[in-house]
């Protein structure tokens, strides 16, 4: 895909996320790897609903700004996912309501935030991790993500929101949307003892679709 079409794709998906209320105001950011190792990213303090394809931030493979406005201040967390998830080609970070709500609940397993509620939560999200709260833009959040050693493509930032890596922009967007729907289900079903997918059903999904193992990894 040409760079101009990649720019248009970022803007199209970003507007869709904004118009459906998945990230309000000037929150949320998206980045996409280019073939030369550089990145396109949404600018700092930009609304995802009103982006201009020509005004995205273009960074070189060394992380320096080549053209456009300054990139989102959350670039450190994007970079950390690219560094630790070798297959990642796009990263999406939102402030979606239900995901943020789940990140604030007590008793969450930081290595596996959600129970196995649906097939698509396992197929598109996998085991979502939870990292502690850091100030938005704090480089320490990147160290926390690096500490996950690439075991998770989806991460909840406590009291902040989800950040998700994907092999394509579409995959990252769809996984982020699935994470938000899983968070909504999780909140709706709390205290109701829902029927979860069984270990056998999970193994069938993992084996059939070639997914990463669902079981919690060792230290």
Image: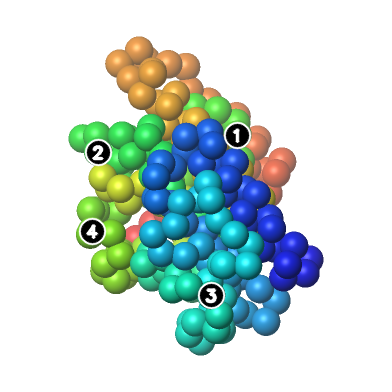
Q: Is residue 6 visible?
A: yes
**Residue with the mark numbered 2:** 104
Q: Distance between the residues labelled 2 and 1?
A: 23 Å
Q: Quadrant of residue 9?
A: bottom right
Residue drawn at the location 43% of the way across and 48% of the way down: 94
Across the whole image, how many numbered discs are drawn on residues?
A: 4
Label 4 – label 1 distance at C-alpha:
29 Å
* Mark 2 and mark 4: Cα distance apart in space: 13 Å
The residue carrying mark 4 is: 134
Q: Where is residue 194 in the image (x, y as percent from the top left)?
A: 42, 16
Question: Where is mark 1, residue-wise?
Answer: 120
The residue pinned by badge 3 equals: 68
Q: Nearer the viewer, residue 216 or 145?
A: 145
Q: Residues within 10 Å of mark 4 (few under 14, many from 20)?
A: some
2 vs 1, front mark? 2
Quarter of the image containing the C terminus?
bottom left
Asked if the residue at tag 1 contacts the one at tag 4, i.e. Cβ–Cβ closer than 8 Å, the answer is: no
Task: Select label 1 or label 3 by which is in front.
Answer: 3
The image quadrant of residue 88 is bottom right
Q: Is residue 138 left or right of residue 57?
A: left
């Amino acid at each position: 895909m040409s760079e101009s079409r990649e720019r248009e794709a970022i803007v199209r998906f970003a507007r869709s996320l904004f118009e459906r209320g998945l990230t309000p105001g000037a929150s949320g950011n998206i980045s996409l790897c280019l073939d030369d190792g550089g990145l396109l990213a949404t600018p700092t303090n930009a609304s995802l609903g009103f982006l201009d394809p020509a005004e995205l931030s273009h960074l070189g493979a060394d992380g320096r700004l080549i053209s456009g406005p300054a990139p989102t201040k959350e670039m450190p967390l994007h970079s950390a996912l690219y560094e630790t998830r070798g297959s990642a080609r796009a990263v999406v970070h939102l402030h979606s309501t239900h995901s943020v709500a789940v990140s604030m609940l007590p008793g969450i397993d930081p290595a596996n935030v959600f129970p196995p509620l649906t097939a698509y939560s396992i197929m598109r999200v996998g085991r979502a991790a939870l990292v502690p709260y850091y100030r938005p833009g704090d480089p320490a959040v990147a160290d926390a993500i690096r500490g996950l050693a690439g075991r998770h493509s989806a991460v909840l930032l406590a009291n902040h929101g989800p950040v998700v890596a994907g092999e394509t922009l579409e995959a990252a967007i769809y996984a982020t949307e699935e994470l938000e729907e899983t968070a909504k289900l999780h909140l709706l079903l709390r205290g109701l003892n829902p029927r979860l997918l069984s270990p056998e059903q999970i193994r069938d999904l993992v084996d059939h679709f070639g997914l990463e193992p669902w079981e919690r990894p060792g230290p």
